[in-house]
Image (cartoon, rainbow, N blue to C red):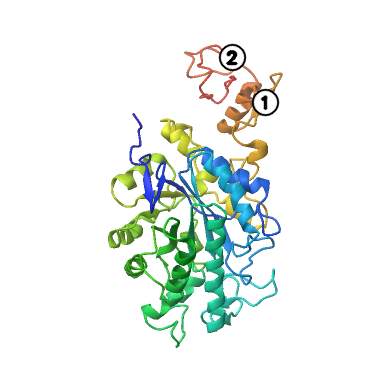
Amino acid sequence: MNPFPHLFEPGRLGKRRTRNRIWMTAHATLLVKDHLFTEEHIAYYVERARGGAGVITMEAMAAHPTTQPYKGKAFAFDPRMVSQYRRIAEAVHAHGSLILAQPWHRGRQTNSVTNGIPVWAPSAIPCAVYRETPHVMTREDIAEIVEGYRLSARFAREGGLDGIEVHGMAHGYLLNQFLSPATNHREDEYGGSLENRLRIVMQILDATRAETGPDFVVGVRINSDDGMEGGLRPEDWAEIARRLEATGHLDYISCSQGTYLNRMMIYPTSPEAHGYQVPATRVVKRAVGLPVVAVGRIVMPEEAEGFLAGGDCDFIGLSRALIADPMWGMKAEQGRSEDIRPCVGANWCMESIFAQAPIACIHNPAAGAEAELGEGTLRPAKAAKRVAVVGAVRAARGAGRAGGLVVPRHGAQGAARDPDSSGASSAPGKGRDPARPCAGRGGACRL
């Protein structure tokens, strides 16, 4: 019997069926080049599909040339993406996962260094991080943004993807800047009342659904709490969600939190409570009838199962958990949650991105290098070697799987007492199940 019946219950997004409720949410990888996918980029998503993710939203892609946080960022509005999507869709579909594109625009939350174009925003209010005074968007500029999202939807459909997730309403990005009174001081039809502040979003959703037709999955990424003074709070987002659902264009809503004024609400470190965003997401969930995706330091399957069973959400969104262990879903389904390599919230993944380097993980060396180091690529060594491991049991396990004889440092200095071997000296094959990791500090064991 599956220990997580809610997590592995099939789901539905519009007319598409999902094999489970595990959703890999979008995150940057820096594995693209010249605005196109690389083999490493494709392998990254395939590894997570193989590992059990039911739905994958690819990393955010620019909906307009005015949003380029770094060189090479994928352009969702570029017709070259059609062939790129076909390659990745075929590879991911082979493992039973759905895959979605995510067009977005950062608005003021970037700079003009990469492209030499002033940043765009609804009002001339600088981002506290990048500190550039934005160009105030004209009606013509707004029309260009809507067109960029429209083209993004067209190319996603033509490329054989399963759907598209309209981003920009979460994390303080451009559409969030239009929605929030804290960042929208306009006095025209795009500012003032909520109806006016929502206007650009409604235009984008109209254009998106017109391009995709009724069979394509269309969703949105929104906040459930901006978490800042003057920003939108859970009840505000619940009302926005109600209005978005009323368009009839959407198949789901994915929730997150935070802006660049408080980025630790977006990707908090280890001290944050697991599931910290769920209470605000629950407010949005109760306001709509659409499936809702929840995120927020959900690390283990037991946590995910509890939130689903409690009716807090319909899908569990994971990013860093799947960076740390792409096989998270497979292990959970097999009842092996104790074998999951958990995300510890070290944010080395974010550090690598901030350094303009490909995605990395503090304890998953295969992250971003799946074709070379991913699941099933390593082979046992022809000859066993002796490896000293200091304070890294999981590394010892990996070395053992490769055929090595692992001897923790203390054990290399002499015979050690192994508490699991009834006082016998630790030695390979004596007093220990070879499938178990070393329990004592000084034991030598074949792992």
Question: Disc 1 to disc 2, how far (Cα)?
Answer: 14 Å
Q: Residue at x 67, y 50 (%)?
A: 38
In the picture, the disc for residue 416 is none
Look at the numbered disc 1 and give the secondary structure of its residue: strand
**Image point (44%, 59%), residue name:** 218
Depth check: 133 or 406 in front? 133
Instruction: Give yes or no for contact between labels 1 and 2 (Cβ–Cβ under 8 Å).
Output: no
Considering depth in this image, is 177 or 279 the residue closer to the camera? 177
96 or 61: nearer the viewer:
96
Left or right side of 108 for 239 = left
Quadrant of the rendering where the N terminus is positioned: top left
* Amino acid type indicated by mark 1: Val
The residue beneath circle 1 is 387
> To which residue does mark 2 refer?
427
Quarter that holds the C terminus: top right
Find residue 249 and report its horizontal and vertical position in percent. 39, 64
Using the image, determine if residue 377 lies above or below residue 415.
Answer: below
User: Is residue 128 among the parts visible in the rendering?
Assistant: no
Q: Nearer the viewer, residue 403 or 96?
A: 96
How crowded is the residue under tag 1: few (<14 C-alpha within 10 Å), some, or many (20+)? some
Task: Say what amino acid the circle numbered 2 marks.
Answer: Ala
